[in-house]
Image: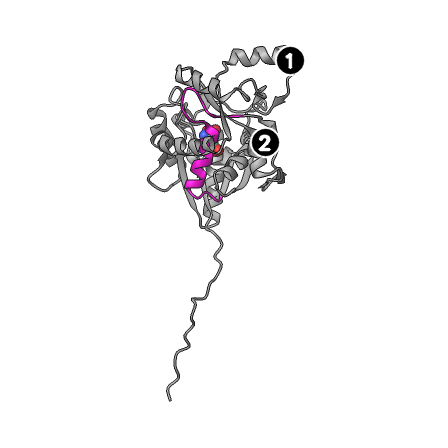
Amino acid sequence: MTAQPVMTAQPVMTVQPAMTVTRFAPSPTGHLHRGHAYAALKAWQFARERDGRFLLRIEDIDFNRCDAANTEQIFEDLAWLGLDWEKPVRIQSEHFKDYHRAAERLRDGGFLYPCFCTRKDIEREIEAAGQAPHGSEGAIYPGICRHLPNDEQDARIAAGEAHALRLNLEKALEEVGRNLSWHDSTAGEQSAAPERLGDAVIVRKDIGTSYHLAVVVDDGLQGITDIVRGVDLFESTHLHVVLQRLLGLPTPRYHHHPLLTDSEGNRLAKRNQSITLKALRETGLTAEELVEACVPRE
Ligand code: GLU
């Protein structure tokens, strides 16, 4: 008798660790500088070291501040640095529909409310209340529009009054609970503390979305497993994990890195044109020398 091949009723399941996917997500509001080069290299290397994928995303939803020429310059600068990334590149301004859909979902769930306040209204209220709590993004919204009656909201919207949509944080926390946590590879396990940002603007008056909403939606849609970015965005993560939970998206692992500073210890800024990658390249600096010089003060 010939031996029969052993048949298994079920394919054997093996658990594959998810492939690492990172991204670099610059906003084309100006030319990149050494700080961006450092951040881009960090995210790219992180993926390379793990045989993962590296994506580039252009965060240009703020059409008042971004322009296409800067986007082209970003591609040129990063290629010069020796980075490669998957195509097509996600350009946020081509995906407003995705952000609108997510905002609608949050709104339908009762997690957003219209806010008609101007900056002045908020300042006045804060002044009148004396000492205002300050969060990581400046003054925490004092809640002026949080409990407007529905008919007043509807009437003001119908009358065309400009408004943003803010997160009703209290309501959001009732939904997602107060025990959310996230992990940062340097700072360790973090208990989410979204109250540091308060009722943040999720849909801006002028652009119909916000950095917070677009970044969470895109990281989810693009399957980002590891967010490697500057520590200046550390505090925003406390809000992002709440939005992820409300939208049914996974929370990635975070790797916030220190920012490059100049010789006086000041953070590099786009407004200092002399240090753009383009300007440095034009002085004859090579990409290798630049990479070499990208060492932050810890
Ligand atoms: N677009 C953001 C910036 O240029 C970065 C977003 C992120 O990495 O989450 O600051």
* x and y percentages locating residue 233 in the rendered image: 54, 31
**Secondary structure state at the residue bearing disc 1:** loop
Label 1 CB less than 8 angstroms from ligand 1: no
| Residue 94: quadrant of the picture | top left
> Eyeballing the image, is 124 above or below 136?
above
- What range of the chain is rendered magenta? 200-225
Q: Quadrant of the C terminus?
A: top right
At 39% across and 78% down in the image, what residue appears? 5
Query: Which circle marks residue 129 in the picture?
Result: 1
Give me the C-alpha separation between circle 1 and circle 2. Answer: 22 Å
User: In the figure, is residue 267 to the left or right of 40?
Assistant: right
- Residue 202: in magenta span: yes
- Amino acid type at image mark 1: Ala
* x and y percentages locating residue 223 in the rendered image: 44, 44
Label 2 packing within 10 angstroms: few (<14), some (14-19), many (20+)? many
Residue 34 visible to the viewer: no
> Front-most of 259 and 155?
155
Which residue appears farthest toward the bottom when viewing the image? 1
Task: From the image, tell me which residue sits under label 2.
Answer: 194
- Residue 213: in magenta span: yes
**Secondary structure state at the residue bearing disc 2:** helix
> Eyeballing the image, is 79 above or below 200?
below
Circles 1 and 2, Cβ within 8 Å, touching? The answer is no
At 58% across and 34% down in the image, what residue appears? 173
